[in-house]
Amino acid sequence: MGPNLKHMRTDSASLANNLPVSDDRELGIIAGARFDDNAANPIIEGDNDGFLSVGVTLLDCEDDFVVLPEGHMFIVHKRETKKNVVSFLKSGRFLEGL
């Protein structure tokens, strides 16, 4: 899983919950969720990408948020993800997700 596994936590001391937040930037979050037995993890409560639940990706400071029907490991390689990134960089908004 690599060295970043230790950062995949949701408690108050986690890396994600302690990153600095600036008001002079736009922040978009892309989450994945699979609804089949190939990628969804039955141990994780709620919609998930096999590693993280959709709910823990929210930071309460994002300008936009989208859920794509992809698993954690491959979401960055998908055309739909790239289209959403381009849309957010151009307009500050994602395309429609799930």
Image (tube, grey):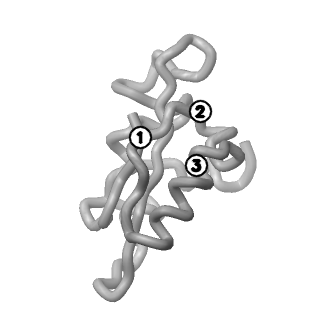
Q: Position of residue 45 (x, y in %)?
A: 36, 25
Q: Position of residue 43 (x, y in %)?
A: 46, 19
Q: From the viewer's perspective, is 22 left or right of 52?
A: left
- Residue that badge 2 annotates: 71
**Between 69 and 57, the one nearer to me in the picture:** 69
The tally of labels here is: 3
**Which mark is first along the chain, 3 or 1?**
3
**Which mark is first along the chain, 2 or 3?**
2
Q: Amino acid at mark 3?
A: Thr
On screen, 82 above or below 61?
above
Q: Position of residue 77 (x, y in %)?
A: 71, 46
Q: Under tag 3, what secondary structure?
A: helix
- Residue that badge 3 annotates: 81
Using a 10 Å C-alpha cutoff, classify the residue at mark 1 as few (fewer than 14 neighbours), some (14 to 19) or many (20 or more): some
Tell me the distance, in whole angstroms, between the alpha carbons under discs 3 and 2: 12 Å
Q: Amino acid at mark 1?
A: Gly
**Between 55 and 3, the one nearer to me in the picture:** 55
On screen, 22 above or below 43?
below
Picture disc at residue 33 = none
Q: Amino acid at mark 2?
A: Gly
Front tag of 1 and 2 = 1
- Residue that badge 1 annotates: 97
Q: Under tag 2, what secondary structure?
A: loop
Q: Quadrant of the C terminus?
A: top left
